[in-house]
Amino acid sequence: MLEKFKEIGRLFRLKSEVTGYEQITAGNINTTYRVYYANNKSYIFQKVNISVFKDPIGVMHNIDNVTTYIREEYPGEISLHYHHTIYGDNYIILDGEFWRVMCDFDSMTLDSCESLEEIKAIGEAFGEFQRKLASFDSSVLVESIKDFHNTELRINTLLEYADTRAIKCDEVEYIRSVAKEASKVSKMVKEGILPTRVCHNDTKANNVLLDKESHKPLVVIDLDTIMPGTGLYDFADGARFICSTAVEDEQDLSKVDFDLKKFEAFSKGFLGSVKAAATKEEKEFTVLSVFSITIELASRFLLDYLQGNVYFKCNYPEHNLVRTRCQLRLAKSIMSKYDDMNKIVQDIFNN
């Protein structure tokens, strides 16, 4: 790998010599490395999963447009920078592999978070990211993954696969029982009832870089799925991830619950940043979106498990099934606390 990284660095016009590297194991899709140079600098080298991102050049086109816009509209603020090659592109295809290089920040990320102050700050970081792009021309963006947050389609694809193969299990039947309710948000987007906004589409807590000392947000990362969609799902996916009392692949389901205090902190940060532009319909269906996105992810995990684990990285054969059960347990907790969550949200919108 060292020789390959030297060649990638040369193509991306990086100065000095490569001295070492380490793999960053976070993330289920791409393969990421931190590469060290003799001038005491480091860079993030990432091999894009072209089986997931069928149009990786389009993905990099989106990233270039969005990061350039943010740098120009908000000068002086920290922003992502993807390096350009000697050919002028922000990517390189080498030995059939698709690579990109990003600046490295002296920062940290959180896979889980207990501090309500940090949770609010992460929510605000994602909310501000969406707010900053409110006037961005979304027509220049390609759809990096078709129907990425089409919950109705995701659920139907799972159910059709299970029915075709006569697969019957508790997980499939529960998803079938809530399919209509979980699909409402995506149907309203398709019908134009909910507005289309430029969205991050992967608002997990570990996609915000934090200052190591203050734990204040520095910048939002992982822009592979930035594209037009509903802003509700940016909020919902962040809440789903950060308000769970357990990791996404927790095998002991008794540990999985939805934390209302975390939800209130995240909501204050995120919704406080975007509420001025929120429509009546967005306000009404904010909480439902959290349930919807959780069922959507459970459907994706379960379908991948049934198809042989071809999409998400897995550490063992039942990994996606464990993830499915964890998300379904979380979804049930969300529904049991729906009224309390809605009160929190409406209080924020009305104050």
Image (tube, rainbow, N blue to C red):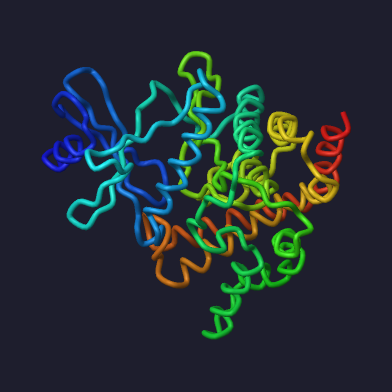
Q: Would residue 112 appear left or right of 179 to someone viewing this image?
A: left
Please determine whether, in this image, residue 298 is positioned above or below residue 251.
Answer: below
Question: Dividing the picture into quarters, in which one does residue 34 lie?
Answer: top left
Q: Please tell me which residue is depicted at 57% across the width and 48% down the height of the picture.
A: 201
Q: Residue at x 19, y 40 (%)?
A: 8
Give x and y (percent) for residue 104: 35, 27
Quarter of the picture containing the C terminus is: top right
Side of 277 relative to 330 (left or right): right
Judged from this view, the residue extending furthest toward the left is 3
Task: Please determine whether, in this image, residue 60 is positioned above or below residue 96.
Answer: above
Residue in front for this viewpoint, 221 or 11: 11
Percent across and percent down for residue 224 are 46, 47
Q: Is residue 239 above or below residue 169?
A: above
Q: Position of residue 299 (x, y in %)?
A: 58, 64
Quarter in which the N terminus is drawn = top left
Left or right placement of residue 160 versus residue 344 in this view: left
Between 158 and 114, the residue placed more toward the observer is: 158
Residue at 62%, 33% (x, y): give it.
132
- How many numbered tags mark residues here? 0
> For the point 54% across and 46% down, which residue is it?
202
Compared with residue 231, is residue 193 higher up or lower down, i.e. above or below? below
Instruction: Give the quadrant of residue 181.
Output: bottom right
Residue 326 on image: x %, y %: 58, 54
| Residue 23 in view here | yes
Task: Please tell me which residue lies in front, 340 or 8.
Answer: 8
Q: Is residue 255 visible?
A: no
